[in-house]
């Protein structure tokens, strides 16, 4: 098989983890052709983001302190992970070149006193540049041929939307398939840095948080992979958060559309666009744990087998949000009201997670993250209060509870079952939405009622008996 295997930052954060990964790859490569995709080592991207914040605050010493923390950590990992002295020596030399470039970049940004989206992408791409060299050297150390490649080097070409770029698929497909096919014919395992590519001018771009998954599926679609595995510290997608529900079960199989909904509702930090490259090619994907390789994890396919078509697959929750109820008599029957509200929020860079409007049109209720709440309220007050909005009512600290499952479509009585179970547990619901696809039924409760609501629904739909 042609496999693309992506490792998250937690899977490669210690010397022991990196050795386990390289041994697993070594074993798999005896039977399969493999491309490995890696995230930055756990915590590195956060440190690089903090460096950029220190530069903006003109705190050069803090930026340099963080840089030396990154440098020391990677040097230490290199020495602990690689046993053969010639491989280790080569690795340290390559890492030193990257460190010199990182420090020169920080100096340049400090001199300019600014962080542009372009320089930011260049800065945070270093996490993956360093991790792929460690993983690739570990594979060499275990006796296989391997080379590290950045997203740019493997051939991922994107638009110039720094921080949130998208691959230009036709060009990317040609370049990536050519690069990877050559490496396959040389029996070389490529270790590709996730999360980054380069625009047509060669400037480094990033896909945004969780973008390594997106890199893996993009590469998988380019090389017509048989399967894509996302390896992290979780066994797969679960029926609920195991921290809340003790008897939560691993889901053996879900459809793409269910997995997209689960990703959006926090089942696992998957980049929302991860599934785009797979849909046309219908490539199956597995979400697995790198710490428990005997477990097959969750299989994500276009149409799961009929044996796993349960009404409800999982109960997800997203805590710490704010609810804004926007009211105004002049909103009734006025075309473009909703457009003005959402344009105002979009201009302030606020993501709306949930929307509900009553048929009388006299109020629209939206849910945003707690961190965006103040910004959202002040933007709406400044632009629209006294014009189309008469009143704003705000509720802080609410959670979205979402039931996800394609089997809900056309099944009578799901909603009554849901709200019956919620009522029995004396939980108050402040907002409800369900799209016409009936794939997801979501409602809002207080943060403090989250656990009770999730457990009640998990029991009601007997999700511990799934699969």
Image (cartoon, helix red, strand yellow):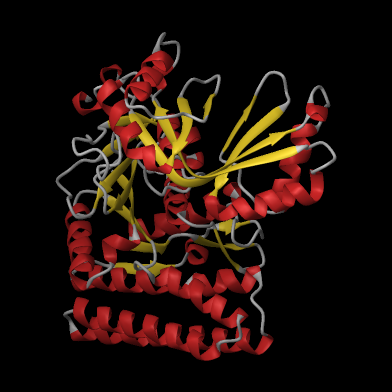
Visible residue check, residue 197: yes
Q: Quadrant of residue 310?
A: top left
Residue shown at 72% from the left, 19% from the top = 360
Q: Where residue 74 appears, x then y in whole percent? A: 32, 79
**Is residue 335 shown above or below 416?**
below
386 or 291: nearer the viewer: 386
Q: Residue 126: percent from the left, percent from the top?
A: 46, 74
Q: Is residue 263 above or below residue 370?
A: above
Q: Residue 146 appears in which quarter of the rendering?
A: bottom left
Residue displayed at 29% across by 68% down = 135
| Above/below status of 135 relative to 66 | above
Picture coordinates of residue 21, whole percent (x, y)? 22, 61
Where, by quadrant of the figure, is residue 412 drawn?
top left
Residue drawn 50% across the image and 91% down it: 61
Q: Is residue 410 left or right of residue 378?
A: left
**Picture quarter with the C terminus:** top left
Pick the quarter of the image with the N terminus: top left
Q: Nearer the viewer, residue 19 or 189?
A: 19
């Amino acid at each position: 098989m042609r496999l693309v295997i992506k490792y998250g930052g937690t899977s490669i954060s210690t010397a022991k983890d990196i050795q386990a990964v390289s041994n697993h790859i070594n074993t798999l490569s005896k039977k399969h052709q493999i491309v490995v995709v890696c995230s930055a080592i756990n915590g590195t991207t956060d440190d690089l983001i903090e460096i950029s914040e220190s530069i903006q605050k003109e705190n050069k010493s803090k930026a340099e302190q963080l840089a030396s923390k990154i440098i020391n950590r990677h040097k230490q990992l290199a020495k602990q992970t690689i046993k053969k002295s010639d491989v280790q020596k080569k690795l340290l030399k390559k890492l030193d070149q990257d460190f010199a470039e990182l420090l020169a970049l920080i100096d340049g940004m400090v001199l300019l006193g600014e962080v542009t989206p372009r320089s930011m992408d260049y800065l945070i791409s270093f996490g993956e540049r360093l991790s792929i060299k460690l993983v690739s050297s570990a594979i060499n150390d275990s006796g296989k041929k391997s080379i590290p490649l950045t997203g740019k080097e493997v051939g991922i070409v994107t638009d110039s939307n720094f921080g949130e770029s998208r691959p230009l698929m036709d060009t990317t497909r040609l370049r990536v398939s050519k690069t990877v096919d050559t490496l396959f014919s040389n029996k070389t395992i490529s270790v590709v840095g996730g999360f980054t590519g380069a625009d047509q001018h060669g400037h480094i771009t990033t896909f945004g948080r969780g973008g390594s998954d997106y890199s893996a599926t993009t590469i998988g679609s380019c090389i017509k992979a048989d399967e894509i595995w996302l390896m992290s510290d979780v066994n797969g997608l679960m029926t609920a958060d195991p921290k809340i529900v003790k008897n939560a079960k691993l889901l053996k199989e879900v459809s793409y559309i269910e997995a997209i909904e689960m990703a959006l509702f926090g089942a696992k930090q998957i980049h929302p666009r991860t599934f785009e490259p797979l849909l046309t090619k219908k490539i199956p994907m597995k979400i697995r744990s790198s710490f428990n390789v005997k477990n097959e994890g969750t299989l994500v396919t276009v149409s799961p087998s009929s044996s796993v078509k349960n009404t409800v697959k999982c109960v997800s929750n997203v805590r710490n949000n704010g609810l804004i109820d926007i009211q105004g008599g002049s909103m009734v029957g006025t075309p473009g009201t909703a457009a003005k509200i959402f344009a105002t929020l979009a201009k302030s860079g606020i993501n709306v997670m949930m929307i509900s409007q009553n048929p009388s049109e006299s109020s629209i209720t939206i849910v945003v993250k707690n961190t965006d709440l103040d910004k959202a309220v002040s933007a709406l007050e400044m632009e629209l209060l006294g014009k189309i909005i008469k009143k704003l009512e705000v509720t802080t600290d609410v959670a979205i509870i979402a039931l996800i499952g394609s089997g809900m479509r056309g099944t009578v009585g799901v909603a009554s079952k849901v709200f019956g179970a919620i009522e029995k547990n004396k939980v108050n619901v402040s907002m409800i939405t369900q799209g016409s696809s009936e794939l997801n039924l979501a409602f809002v409760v207080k943060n403090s009622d989250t656990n009770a609501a999730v457990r009640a629904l998990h029991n009601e739909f007997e999700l511990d008996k799934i699969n």
